[in-house]
Each structure stands twice: as C-alpha cells, then as structure tokens.
Amino acid sequence: MPRRMRVTREFRPIRGAFTGGASARARGSANGRARGSERECTRGERGVVLIWFALMLIMLMGFAGFAVDLSNWWFQAEKIQRSADAGAHAGAAFLPGDLPSATTTARTLTSQNGFKNGSNATVTVSQEPNPNRLRVKVKATIPTYFVGLLGVKSVDLTREAVAEYVAPVPMGSPENKLGNDPARAQNTPQFWINIAGPNATKKSGDRFQAKVCATSVANCTGTVISGINNDEYSTEGYFFALKVTSVVTGQPLNIQVYDPAMTYVNDTCGANMPTQSEANALQALPGNPYPDAAVRFAPGLTSWCTGDQDISGRGTKTTFIVRSPDATPWSDLDNPVVAGCTKQMPSYDPGGSNPTIYQYLHPTDGKQDAQAVVNPADGSNTFAELFRQNVTICSIPAGSVSTGEYILQVRSNATAAAPTVYSASVVDGGHNRMSIFAGFGTAGLAAVDGSAVSINARGRLPIYANATAANTSFYLARVLPYDAGRTLRVTLFDIGDAASAGVLQILPPAEFAATFSGCVFSRDDGATLSSTPSTCTLSNVSSGNGFDGRSVTVDIPIPANYTCTPAVATQCWIKVRAAFPSGVTDTTTWSAAILGNPIRLVE
C-alpha cells in the first residue's frame, strides 16, 4: 500500500506584506528604551533630591546656628543694658559736683553686673549738658558660635543709659544771706529763719521741729513716731546748703548767725525790751561798748526785731553744726563735721525774777555784769555778744576751704554733751528766730551776691515772716530749665494766721513769664478753696477760713518752654507773693520738691 506522505506547511509571512511584526518590534524597542530612560531619570532625580536636601540641610543648620547666635546677642545685649542702667543709676547720685566719684561708682556697678572696664568691656562715663545727668556707655565684644564658621568670630555690642539725680530744691535765697540783715542794712527779704523747740505746738507754724499737736492739725495722728503727736517731726532738724562755687585766696570762709540765742521778746518785740531811754543810756556808756544801742536795742517792731516768742516755753537751745562737702549729696548726715564748728546757744528769759535785757547789757549795774563782757577771744558767749549781734559760728581757715556744698544743720533737740545726736529728753519750747550769712572774710560777709557763696534751705524752709508791706514777694524755690515739663510741688503749712483774708500767688521767674497757669491747689482736710488755676492764685487765706494749722499743696506744671539762666544767681527763682491788708506776720513752713523719683533713668 503506498505510504501516505504528511506535508507540513510553515507559515512565513511575506516581508512587507504586513506591518504588525515591525510595529511590534518597534514598540518593544521603544518600550525598552522608555523603561531605560525612566530608570535613568529616576536615578537622576534621586541624586538631585539628595543634593537639594543636603543644601537645604546646610541652610537650615546655618539658620539654626544664626538663630542661636542671634539669641545670644540679644541676651548679651540685655545684660549689657542692665549693666549700663545700674551704673548710671548708681553714679548719678554723685552729681552735679563729683564726676570722678560718679565714674568710679558707675564702673563698679557695671563690673558687678558682668562687664568690667578694661577687662571684658569698655565703660565710658560722661556728664550731660544737664549737670545732674550721667551717661554710661558699655561696649563689649561677644564671641560667636555657628556664625564663626562663616568667618565672623565676634560682634561688638554697645548699650547706654542716662540717669538723673533730682537734688533737693533750693529755697529762700539766691544770695549769701538767708533772712534779714539789719546790721548791714542790706538784703531785707522780710523774714527770719524760725526754729521751734520740741515742746512747741505745731499749729504755731513749725511743721518739722514742734512735737505737740492735736488731731485737728495736719498730719497729727500720733501713730508714726512713738510718743510724738506730730507725724512729720524731724529728729534731724533743718538743713541749709552753703554752696561754695569759688574760693577767695587768702580768706577764711566765715559763717555767721544774727541773734542765734533765743531771748523772749514776743513776736513784735513788745516784751522785756529796754525802753527807749534805756537804749539811749546804753549808747552813752563810757567806752562806747554799744555805739548804735539807741537803734539796735530800741523796743518795738524795728528792723532789728527777730521776735523770739514763747510757744509752750522760752527755753529753746539751738544747735548749729557745720558739715564739709562730701561725695554723697543724697545724704547730709554723713558729711564730716568741720572741726570747731559745732555750737549750742543758750536761751534767755529776761524779766520777772530774772534780769531784764537792759540789766544783762549794762556792765556795771551789779546785775549779771559778766553777761555784758565782750571778748571774742575768751571762747565763751555772753548775752552782749549774742543779743542782736552777728555771731561767727564757724570760720574755716584759708587753704582749708573747698568748693562744693557745706551743710549747716540747725536743730533744737540735742544736748550740749551730744549735739549731733537726737535726744528725746530735750523738752524746751519756744520759737527762736535768726538770719544766716556766709562769705570769705569781712568783705565777703558784707557783699550781697551769690557769686562765690550762696545759702538756701534744702527742700524745707521754716520762716517767721514779718513783712509790713501789704504786697510782698518772697523767694520760694529755684527751678532750672532742665526741669521743664515736670511738676513742682509746693507745700505751705500754716499760712493762715492773719485775721484779714489775703491772697497768695505763685510767680514764675520774671525773666521767663508773668504768671504760671494750670496750678492745682488742695488742702489736707479736703476743703474747697478759692483758687484761680490760670494765674496760680489762692484767695481768702485767713485763720477764719480754716488755714490755721493746715497744709496747702500747690502742684505747678513747669511749661515745656520754661527757660532761665542758671549761671545768674538771681535767675530761675520762683516766688510767692503775699498780699494781706495789713502786711504779713506769720510763722510758717514751706517745702518744695520736683515730683518723681530722686534718682531715675531718663534714657
């Protein structure tokens, strides 16, 4: 049987007849290339991200490092600022007169706060045009951390501060005299300095040296000082500044007090005084010990009459203490006492069982003849050497006088054995009235100016005003141009003894303006007052209107454009004008202060 053959057909597409194969191969090739490209792109992107991340990390680390350094700079700048603040605040207390001490103190404080001059900082201290202001500049080099990698190894930081010391306000006088000067017939402001004994009544006018008062009197609760009714009583007495601006070569600095010992004659010298015929007889004595006795010792309200008064006693013994300038103007008690310049004056109560003034002064009548001896060289004070005389209580030799502020402390509450210490055992009463003078040599005492020496009360002025004129102006307080824009607070205590109503007005320096405006008046008892703020005037002032024993406060806005010339002694003085129908006869205490902290940062 014939073998059957199997034919196998192989299908082979004709090249070119169909496109499917070529297209597939093309697609396959393209896909392969695409997949390769994707793989290459992925690898490239992955590398870019790494580079980007690395760069960003470096930037972030740089920012973080800069933030660390910036924070440190801020922290160090705050420390430097606090250091400058502390230095300025501490140093300003020595101004205006002691820049070296101010500089030393300021640098000590900056060192204590971490920045020592010449070590890790440069501390520059300077006095501003306002002499009460101190500028402290602290410059320190601060090392860097991360920023140092960029080549900035350190930065210099500087901070500065300005502090101001507001000194007690000078009161009462622009000259070298404080009070009337009858012996030289000069400088008659028509008031005397008044010092009360501790047993005197506050209502009688002395705000700070009289202990006794009822609760109806201003600030008399008896709760501040144990055993003393007067809450404002000062155990230290009063302080007066004797500012020496220049020294006169070869001349001693003399400090005198007119009528320093209390002698009871009453307010108008109508008690215990010699008669006019007796005064004439004293002038006619052999040897002429009293060449002007007919005038000096005449009775009545003459220019020589201080008016020492019996206020719960006649025994006020007044102590005078002269202290040298020092480096702490904010404290008067730490000023060194000048050798030989502490004096306590006796008191006299003439008449009755005691000799009369005429008998004290007469050298040969057999009545206290020793009190009529005048011998300055014997070291003792007799009545004739004290009564209505200018008495030298301190003489600082030429060559020992320095510029600056000498302090005269006047008090009535110390014993002769311990004159610089308060004694509660002193219970004398009465008002002792006087004047204070200072100058170089005899010529300096006679001069009426403040060019070399000036005297004024430091913030508190106790006076007995005996102005006979119906309209009298008194020097109140000195305010310098640097205090423009601030507020002067004046307190007038017991200004209402007059029976007839009067007017008080606070006046600006004449070289600046005619009136102040915007003044605010108030009384400690809250009474409604008749005031005119636009002219700084207070009306209806009298005892009948409730002013007796009360404190009146006047807040005076110092205008922003306030100006005067501090170099001229009589400029920059604010005055108080008293207009009463029959003149002014009143014991009163005035005080003045610029409101605000005494030492404060102003920049």
Image (spheres, grey):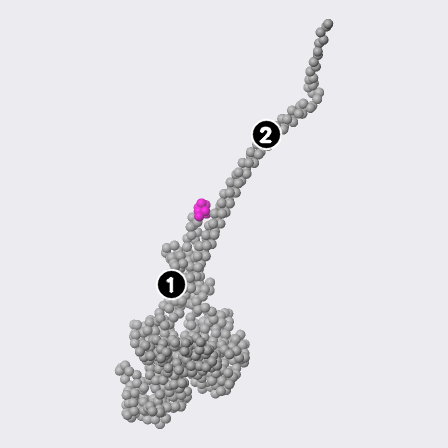
241 sits left or right of 500 in the view? left
**Magenta range:** 145-151
Tag 2 secondary structure: helix
Residue 24 in view, yes or no? yes
Q: Which residue is mark 2?
A: 36
Amino acid type at circle 2 is: Gly
Crowd band around label 1 with a 10 angstrom C-alpha radius: few (<14), some (14–19), many (20+): many
Give whichever of 278, 50 is nearer the camera: 50
The residue at which mark 1 appears reads as 105
Query: What's the CA distance linking mark 2 and mark 1?
Result: 81 Å
Could you tell me which residue is drawn at 37 percent across and 62 percent down? 104
Q: Nearer the viewer, residue 20 or 152?
A: 20
Residue 260 counted in the magenta span: no
Name the residue rendered at 42%, 76% in the picture. 225
- Tell me which residue sits at (44%, 64%) in the image: 163
Residue farthest toward the top in the current orientation of the protein: 1
Q: Is residue 473 among what the camera can see? A: no
Q: Which amino acid lies under the numbered mark 1 shown in the image of this protein? A: Thr
Image position of 68 with respect to 584: above or below: above
Crowding at dot 2, Cα within 10 Å, few <14 / some 14-19 / many 20+, comes out as: few
Residue at point 52%, 75% (across, down): 519
Pointer 2 or 1: first along the chain: 2
Magenta: predominant secondary structure element? helix
**Image quadrant containing the N terminus:** top right
Instruction: Find residue 206 and report its horizontal and vertical position in percent.
Output: 42, 80
Secondary structure category for the residue under label 1:
helix
Image quadrant assignment for residue 351: bottom left
Q: Nearer the viewer, residue 22 or 391?
A: 22
The image position of residue 115, as x and y in percent, is 40, 57
Can you name the residue that lies furthest to the left here?
378
Residue furthest front in the image:
1
Where's residue 401, x and y in %?
Answer: 32, 72
